[in-house]
Amino acid sequence: MFCEQHVTTALEQAIDPWLVHMRWRRDFERWRERRVNQELYQSERLAQLAQVAGRLDGMHLLDLGAGMGGFAVAAALRGALVTATEFNPAYCRIITLRAARHCLGLPVINAAGEALPLPAAAFDTVVCWDVIEHVQSPDRVLGEIARVLRPGGVALVTVINRRAWIDPHYHMRGINWLPRSLAEQLIAQRGRGKQGAAFRDMQRLSDMHYFDYQAFVALAARHGFSTTDLREDQLARGALHSPKASRRVARALLRRVGLERVAYRLQRAWYAGMFELALNRR
């Protein structure tokens, strides 16, 4: 239940300048509504966190690069002891407004992931979703995640595939298989760039950090992490849901001949837009 209606109005006014560059989306109004009420659409990620890290109630949780705060607020409402860090000061205000809408006093820290003003071994779990591609140094961010995690802790991260067929940011096919200069020309021609948006850095395709799967696993290992592909884990447990009937049939056939995991790994390497990973601190 929302705490104050005037807070919701202030929240919408704070969010809208950060959405105007996406008006090319056919579903813009629906997409905007999900941004304004982001905390109401976190059930899948909450379930994923509980599956990997256990019960949320009482969990010391760092949301690194919390964005507009939807997950941080949703996790706090479930009883997690959440600290949110965010590099963008305007987003910090949005997180605070979102938390106030639910009468939550959520700690929000304006900080870069490469230098977290937080003590070592302070958190059971770190989530870092839709962040790695935008930071200055993924290597330093992983070092900070390892530092603030308690021994045996886990971090849930998303990483963009360097070979993603449909780019997750620009929603265009094939641009990640092109030289970055040519890809950015095509993005500009389609009107999908972020010129005129409130964003200022690490938003151009050539600035962002996309990874080959094995390259990121090796980078995480240098910081003491073993990596679990959460979707492959779901596949192994028979819990990976395919929304399309044709895909379910194809997977059943591949499973029957023992090639389901091989097909998944080929798809992960050459097509998937994003890797969803659990980094387990050894």
Image: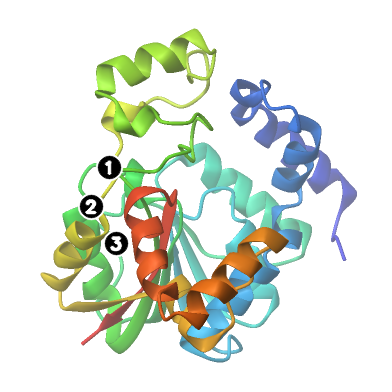
Residue 23 in sight: yes
- Left of 130 or right of it: where is 212? left
Tell me whether the residue at label 1 lies in contact with that at label 3, contact meaning CB atoms closer than 8 angstroms: no
Q: Residue furthest front?
A: 257
- How far apart marks 3 and 2 lie (CA) works out to 17 Å
In front of the other: 245 or 45: 245
Which of discs 3 and 2 lies nearer the camera? The answer is 2
Residue 138's tag is 2
- How far apart marks 2 and 1 lie (CA) works out to 8 Å
Residue 59 in sight: no
In front of the other: 275 or 280: 275
Q: Secondary structure at mark 1?
A: loop
| Image x and y of residue 259, in percent | 40, 74
Q: Which quadrant: the C terminus?
A: bottom left
**In the rendered view, would you say 47 is above or below 142?**
below
Q: Residues within 10 Å of mark 2 (few under 14, many from 20)?
A: some
Residue pointed to by mark 3:
117
Compare marks 1 and 3 and give the one earlier in the sequence: 3
Residue positioned 15% across, 78% down in the render: 224
- Left of 234 or right of it: where is 220? left
Q: Secondary structure at mark 3?
A: loop
Compare marks 2 and 1 and give the one earlier in the sequence: 2
Q: Amino acid at mark 1?
A: His
**In the rendered view, would you say 210 is above or below 125?**
above
Tell me whether the residue at label 2 lies in contact with that at label 1, contact meaning CB atoms closer than 8 angstroms: yes
Residue positioned 70% across, 53% down in the render: 38
| Image x and y of residue 87, in percent | 39, 45
Residue positioned 66% across, 20% down in the render: 24
Residue 159's tag is none
| Image x and y of residue 67, in percent | 52, 49
Residue pointed to by mark 1:
209
Compare marks 3 and 2 and give the one earlier in the sequence: 3
